[in-house]
Amino acid sequence: MSKGIPERAQVVIIGGGIIGASVAYHLTKRGISDVLVLEQGQLTGGTTWHAAGLVSQLKSTYSLTKLATYSARLFEDLEAETGQATGYRKPGSISVAADIERWEELKRGISMASTVGVEIREIEMDELREFWPLVKTDDLVGALYIPDDGKDAGSLDVRVRANSKVLEILSSSLPSHISSDADSLIREMFPIRLILEN
């Protein structure tokens, strides 16, 4: 591997977490090929690394819900796009309300999310117990179910994947789950020139 940071790049992204990787992915999808990602530690080694990986679509605003819905569909399509298993799955999610105010908020969310195309519905307490047999329902006011909410397996494949190739990876600190034997595979899979500085 070469050493040193290139003097020039068309786009420089600071941070190799999920946001930086996503920006790089979308830029390459739009045809920008000279993308440089600068990461001070390990790729996806910060907060991205220990995130729960939940991909929920119901958010507090229309714009955030629309963005979350796009993200859920993107995660779902990555395996077909790349030919690589991502581990993404859709177990769905349940939200519950223990008071009337929270239930009103969730019902507004149902109305708003359905305008974005999110499959979402109220469920009765009996159905909630079918999903989650250990739940205590006597103090709940309502519940909703979103069948297409997902879970990222936390794989590097899901976080940093796209159509073009890495030009360089400059680092002595690739994530520990990537062996040195994987270097050529990484160069084939990743869309960006990754610069990882210690």
Image (tube, grey):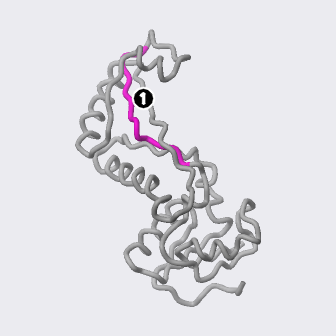
Q: Can you give x and y, in whole percent of width and height, for residue 84 in the image? A: 56, 61
Closer to the camera, 28 or 65? 28
Q: Can you give x and y, in whole percent of width and height, for residue 40 in the image? A: 65, 69
Image quarter of the C terminus: bottom right
Q: Badge 1 is on which residue?
A: 95
Image quarter of the N terminus: bottom right
Q: Can you give x and y, in whole percent of width and height, for residue 26 in the image? A: 42, 69
Question: For the point 65% across and 72% down, which residue is it?
Answer: 185
Q: Can you give x and y, in whole percent of width and height, for residue 148 in the image? A: 40, 40
Where 100 falls versus 157 (above or below)? Answer: above
Question: For the point 52% across and 63% down, which residue is it?
Answer: 83
Question: For the point 55% across and 47% down, which residue is it?
Answer: 53
Q: Indicate the quadrant where residue 120 lies.
A: top left
**Callout 1 environment at 10 Å: few (<14), some (14 to 19), or many (20+)?**
some
Check if residue 19 falls in the magenta segment. no
Q: Indicate the quadrant where residue 177 lies.
A: bottom right
Q: Indicate the quadrant where residue 6 lies.
A: bottom right
Check if residue 141 falls in the magenta segment. yes
* Magenta highlight range: 140-152
Where 45 falls versus 191 (above or below)? Answer: above
